[in-house]
Amino acid sequence: MAILDYEGFWKDALVQLQNDLREEEFSGWFSDMKYLRAGNNSIVIGVPSAFHRDKVISRYQSLVNSILKKVSGQDISLEMELISVDSIETEKKESFTTKSASQNEASTAAQPQETYKTKKKKEKHSQMRDDYTFERYVIGENNKFAANAAIAISENPGKAYNPFLIYGGVGLGKTHLMQAIGNYIHENSDNEVIYITSENFLNEYLEGLSQKTMNVLKNKYRYTDVLLIDDIQFFTDKPGVQEELFHTFNALLDAKKQLVFTCDRPITELKKFPERLISRFGLGLMVDLQPPRYEERCAILKSTAESKNVLIPAEVIDLLSNNISSNIRDLIAALNTLIAYTQLMGKPITLEIAQQRLKTIFNSPKQANLTMDNIIRVVSEYYGLTPNDLKGKKRSQNIVSARHLAMFIGREMTDYSTTEIGQDFGGRDHTTVMYSIDKIKDKLLTDPALEATIDSLKRSIKEFSAK
Ligand code: ADP
Ligand code: MG
């Protein structure tokens, strides 16, 4: 009887599985397996946990057995044994460079990262986090434009896009991307890179004023090669430091030195920001970071777990990605909470533990996807109007009362401030929002049916948002 190559069968079966399954399914369940040995008409595979084994048995056993039959021409079945996580991790590390492109979905777009494998080691930059690099930055649909521009700038500082502004909401990766530019340039060239938060820039400016050492500040910032200033919305309504920024800006631009800024909103929405400063930004490139979609959330969790050498079952990745959609910072914080808890308790990360430990986070209004847009959609639909009717300027009675109601519900169901709500209603002032909310409060006193309408609208909004 010919000797059968069981390990070869297993490799063939994996190739077939990779074809048959969705990428995340395959990488979630099969990339953590390890061929151990041939059994009695079976192939023995190591898996990291009993949970993993049970899920593979219930979901994939018959598929795997039929594939094994196809590739080997024999009745060979799959057997699983538990092995320690470490042995899988070492394996994964060794094959990481060749496998990385297939390890997560978003990395199809993330391929440019490959060129960023470090060549020589230089001293780390003292002002930036060394893990805020392109290698650690998962690129997907939500951020690929921004990331590609950032990469172009890193390769050609001062020449590609200047100034470069990254804007977007809290926790969406502005600082990470900005520092990735800084770290890359620092590591791969002799250019001097300065990173500073706007708050510290202001402090140094105030110190310069009071100590009469302003020339120190000027020399430091006007003669660097790359200047990264984080969170410039902080300069709102601070004319002195804005003036200093303006001169620094001009000096560096004239010298063709790279400027990178981040801001929590589009620059044109900064109130009390001088026009001449705003128009300087128009000379360069402004890109926004959008919240990540489900696929990107999964990819970020996998990549974060990998960097910490922790194995997270696919079901847990799915659970977190489904329930935390606010921003990347919250997503990673939830993962860290889970890792810390399980390590402390000496337990593996399981779906049950994740559900239990993260319950309150999942149920918070922030994660319920209760956006003003969803609220506006449901309310306008209920009254046979369009979202633009509510956001626009029309003042007919039915539109005005639907608008008031949507603002009222927005304030009740979300954590948005009246300023933020006003912005979502075509840039209305917060006092207008407050006035509208008061109107509804008054009506509630005299119109008992209104309360029922509001309750029913709230239910529809929750349902709509959960989709
Ligand atoms: P922001 O400055 O926009 O508030 P940060 O840059 O501080 O956001 O990002 C918040 C967290 O999310 C950080 O831990 C960061 O490393 C992580 N993060 C953001 N975007 C990504 C991404 N695309 N890939 C991996 N991690 C990311
Ligand atoms: Mg930041």
Image (cartoon, rainbow, N blue to C red):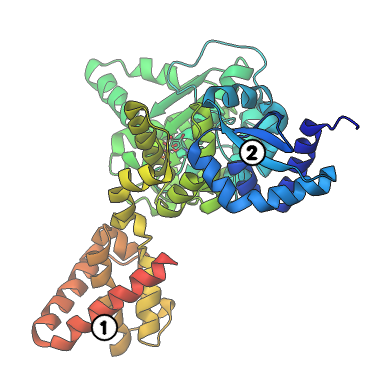
- Which mark is in front, 2 or 1? 2
Which of pointers 2 and 1 lies earlier in the amino acid sequence? 2
Residue 344 % position (x, y): 32, 27
Q: Which mark is residue 228?
A: none
Circle 2 crowding by C-alpha within 10 Å: few under 14, some 14–19, many from 20: some
Residue 134 % position (x, y): 58, 31
Residue 154 lies left or right of residue 248; in this view the side is right
Residue drawn at x 40%, y 67% as measured from the top left: 465
Q: Which mark is residue 79?
A: 2
Residue 104 % position (x, y): 62, 42
Residue drawn at x 91%, y 32% as measured from the top left: 1
Task: Indicate the quadrant where residue 383 lies.
Answer: bottom left
Residue drawn at x 22%, y 20% as measured from the top left: 210
Q: Which mark is residue 401?
A: 1
Q: Amino acid at mark 1?
A: Ser
Q: Is residue 11 visible?
A: yes
Report the image quarter containing ligand 2. Answer: top left
